[in-house]
C-alpha cells in the first residue's frame, strides 16, 4: 500500500512534513523503535483525551448547559470521581499485566527501520482513512462475533458491558483479552496497509479520540458525527450499550446498515423517553 501511494502520487507535498519527520527521527529514534511505545502511547493518549470529559462531568452538577449535552432517556447523572478512580486503576492494571508485554512482542516482530522520507500530505490522508475503514471492518466482525458466540461474550466482552451508561474512561474498561485484541486490530490494520509511521501515529491518536467520544455520554454540538453523517458517534454507540443486538461498528454505520443491525439512535432514545414519561 505504501509503495503504491508513493509511486502513483509522488512526493510533491513531502517537504511540508519532511522537516518534522527528520527532527523526530534524529531526536526520538530510540523511542520510536521501542517495543513498548504502542501500549504506552495508547494508554497515555487515552488518559489525556479523557481529561476534557472529566471536566465536563465535574461541571455537569452546576452547569445547565453541560447537563443539556448529556444524552437523554435514562443516561443518568455524570459518573462520580470515585467511579473514574476505580476505572483508572482497572485499566492501568490490565495494560501493565497483559497489553504491554503482548504488544511489545508484536512490535518486535515488525521492521526495526524507519523510512528516510516523510509521507506527502495526500499519502498521509489516504493511509489514515484506509486504516479507519479496515479497522472499522475488522472491529465490526470481531464485535459481532463476541455478541453472537456466548462463551466469547462471557469470557471476553461482558466486562465492558458492565457500563450500561458508558463514560469516557470506560472506553478501555474491558477484559485484558478484549483490550489486547482491539489494540492488535489497530496495529494490524496499519501494518497490513504498510503505513508510514507518521500516518500510523495519527491514526492511533484519532482512533483513541473517537473511542473516547463514542463512550463519553455527551451528544456534543461539535461532535464529528454531526458533520459526517456516515459516522454514528456517541448516540450510536450508547444505543449499542442499551440494546446490545444493534450498532456493532465502532465509528461508521455502513456495515450495520448492510447487515440489518442498525437502529437509529434518536428513535430508540425517543421510545425509551416516552415509556419513562408514561410511567
Image (cartoon, helix red, strand yellow):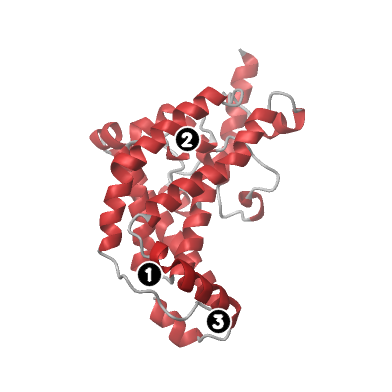
Tell which circle, 1 or 2, labels the residue nearer the N-terminal end: 2
What is the crowding at mark 1: few (fewer than 14 residues within 10 Å), some, or many (at least 20)?
some
Q: Is residue 237 visible?
A: yes
Q: Position of residue 264 (x, y in %)?
A: 56, 41
Report the residue marked by disc 2.
170
Report the residue marked by disc 1.
193
Report the residue marked by disc 3.
14
Which corner quadrant of the image does residue 63 belong to? Answer: top right
Which corner quadrant of the image does residue 18 belong to? Answer: bottom right
Where is 132 relative to 178, above or below? below
Q: Position of residue 15 (x, y in %)?
A: 58, 82
Residue drawn at 34 percent across, 74 percent down: 113
Where is 184 relative to 33, above or below? above
Outermost top residue: 279
If the image is split into quadrants, where does the C terminus sit?
A: top right
Secondary structure beneath dot 3 equals helix
Q: CA distance from mark 3 to mark 1?
A: 19 Å
Amino acid at each position: 500500500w505504501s509503495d503504491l501511494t508513493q509511486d502513483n502520487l509522488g512526493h510533491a507535498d513531502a517537504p511540508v512534513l519532511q522537516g518534522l519527520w527528520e527532527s523526530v527521527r534524529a531526536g526520538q529514534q530510540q523511542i520510536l523503535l521501542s517495543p513498548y511505545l504502542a501500549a504506552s502511547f495508547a494508554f497515555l493518549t487515552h488518559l489525556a483525551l479523557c481529561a476534557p470529559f472529566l471536566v465536563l462531568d465535574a461541571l455537569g452538577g452546576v452547569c445547565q448547559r453541560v447537563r443539556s449535552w448529556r444524552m437523554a432517556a435514562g443516561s443518568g447523572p455524570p459518573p462520580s470521581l470515585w467511579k473514574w478512580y476505580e476505572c483508572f486503576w482497572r485499566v492501568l492494571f490490565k495494560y501493565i499485566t497483559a497489553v504491554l508485554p503482548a504488544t511489545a512482542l508484536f512490535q518486535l516482530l515488525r521492521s526495526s527501520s524507519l523510512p528516510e522520507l516523510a509521507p506527502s500530505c495526500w499519502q498521509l490522508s489516504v493511509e489514515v482513512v484506509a486504516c479507519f475503514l479496515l479497522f472499522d471492518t475488522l472491529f465490526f466482525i470481531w464485535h459481532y462475533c463476541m455478541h453472537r458466540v456466548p462463551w466469547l461474550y462471557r469470557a471476553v466482552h461482558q466486562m465492558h458491558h458492565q457500563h450500561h451508561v458508558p463514560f469516557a474512561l470506560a472506553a478501555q474498561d474491558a477484559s485484558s483479552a478484549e483490550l489486547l485484541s482491539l489494540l492488535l486490530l489497530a496495529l494490524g490494520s496499519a501494518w497490513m496497509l504498510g503505513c508510514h509511521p507518521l500516518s500510523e501515529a495519527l491514526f492511533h491518536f484519532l482512533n483513541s479520540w473517537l473511542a473516547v467520544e463514542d463512550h463519553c455520554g455527551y451528544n456534543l454540538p461539535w461532535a464529528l458525527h454531526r458533520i459526517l453523517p456516515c459516522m454514528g458517534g456517541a448516540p450510536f454507540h450508547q444505543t449499542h450499550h442499551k440494546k446490545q443486538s444493534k450498532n456493532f461498528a465502532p465509528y461508521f454505520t455502513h456495515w450495520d446498515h448492510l447487515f440489518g443491525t442498525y437502529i437509529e439512535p434518536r428513535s430508540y432514545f425517543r421510545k425509551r423517553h416516552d415509556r419513562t414519561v408514561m410511567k
